[in-house]
Structure formats: structure tokens, C-alpha cells
Amino acid sequence: MRILIVTDETGLGWFVKQQLTENFTCKVRIAENNSEARAIMPEFLPQLLLCDVDLNGVGDGMEWIRELQYSYRFEVILVTPYCLNTGILRATEIQPANYLFKPLNPCNIFAAIKLVEPRIAADQLGQAHDGAVSRPPTPLNATDLKVIRLILERKTTNEISEALFLSPYTVKNHRHNICRKLGLKAENNALLKWALKNEARIADYHQPPAWSPPVAEC
């Protein structure tokens, strides 16, 4: 298991690394900021990102994680100094596998990793032909299907936001999350291509909460 710890707290980073190497069979790297993390990603290809949300005092380590998710497949555990509903709701955009609340201790670190291990193992078994990790398909919800149908009509992000009474930022998040659910690469028109290929199923479907999408082909 390859784990990348991202924190600007040097002591915290080494403490977590020690706990991981003592209790799990893993390779661990530490990045002190998002720039270092981005540089490490291509050659290390971590299966788990353990990230401090208060990175460099910014208070939001989630935006750049979402950017990485366009190019890489990995699980996420967020390390946070607080437990606020607003913060957790914000974090759902990147679909973290777990949370760690400060102050950390050996017990909660061990428990958090053990809960994520099965997901990483499943990812390894389902590795796609292109080397990216594939996950079991996640059901699309009603809003997902509305967005996909509007994409089929060649609507732009702004046009979709007007049609669904959502902000353009929210529409972009929906598009990103749909791509993640479908296992699509972050390339131009990937979602449109998928929608065109599955247009008949999308057009005929009328009960969004129960539908699981077909797995995207590599």
C-alpha cells in the first residue's frame, strides 16, 4: 500500500508515518504542501492520500485534491482539527473514505487505515487496462441524470446551471462527480462520449435513485 501524507506540521507527518510503517505493510512519503504532493504523484502513484485540510493555514485542502482526482485514482482520508457539519458537507465533494480528527493518536490512525484497506484491496483487484484503478459503479442520482441529459443536448455549463437553477460551480462539481462515479478519465468530452454511447438507456430511464451506470470501458 502506497500512502502519501500531506501536512505542513513536520512532527505530525513523522508521527503518522511511524504509526503506518509499524502497523501496516506500506510505503510512505510526506509532502509539506500541495506543490510537493503534485510533484510526487506521477512517480509514486499513492493509493491513499492522507491530507491535512488546514494545509499551510489555508483552511481548505480540498480544492487541489479534487483537481488531482481528475488525473489519478486514490482514496482520501482527511485530517481536520475540528468536527463541523459544514466542513464535512464541503468534504463530500471529494468523497473521502474516512476522517481523522486532531489530536491524533495511534488508535484512531490504526482504525482509520484498517477501514480503508478493503477499498484499496478492491481497487487493486479491479485495476483497469490503462493502469488506472476502477471502482464498482456508484448509482447516479436524479440530478446526475438531469445533467447528463442536458449534456446530450450539447448544453454548456452555464446553460445547464440556468436550466437546473444551480450555480456554474455546482454544475462543474456535478460533472466531476459523475465522471468519478463512471470511472471516466479527465479528458475533453469524456462525459459527452459516454452519454452518447449510452443515450438509449439514459433516455428510457425514469427512476434515477435505483440505477447503477454501466462500467466505462477503457
Image (tube, rainbow, N blue to C red):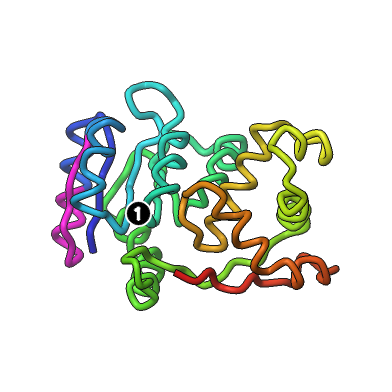
Q: Residue at x 49, y 71 (%)?
A: 217
Quadrant of the rendering where the N terminus is positioned? bottom left
Q: Nearer the viewer, residue 64 or 87?
A: 64
> Is residue 22 located in the magenta-colored stretch of the structure?
yes
> Is residue 121 located in the magenta-colored stretch of the structure?
no
Q: Nearer the viewer, residue 3 or 80?
A: 3
Give the amino acid at mark 1: Asn
Q: Could you say where residue 177 lies in the image, as x and y percent from the top left? A: 58, 51
Q: Residue at x 23, y 32 (%)?
A: 32
Q: Could you say where residue 175 lies in the image, as x and y percent from the top left? A: 62, 47
Q: Residue at x 19, y 54 (%)?
A: 19
Can you tell which quarter of the image residue 110 is in?
A: bottom left
The reply, left or right, for residue 80 in relation to residue 188 is: left
Q: Residues within 10 Å of mark 1 (few under 14, many from 20)?
A: some
Placement of 120 over or under 101, stated as above or below: below
Looking at the rendering, the stretch of residues picked out in magenta corresponds to: 17-31
> Which residue matches tag 1?
108
Q: Could you say where residue 99 lies in the image, as x and y percent from the top left? A: 44, 49
The reply, left or right, for residue 163 in relation to residue 14 is: right
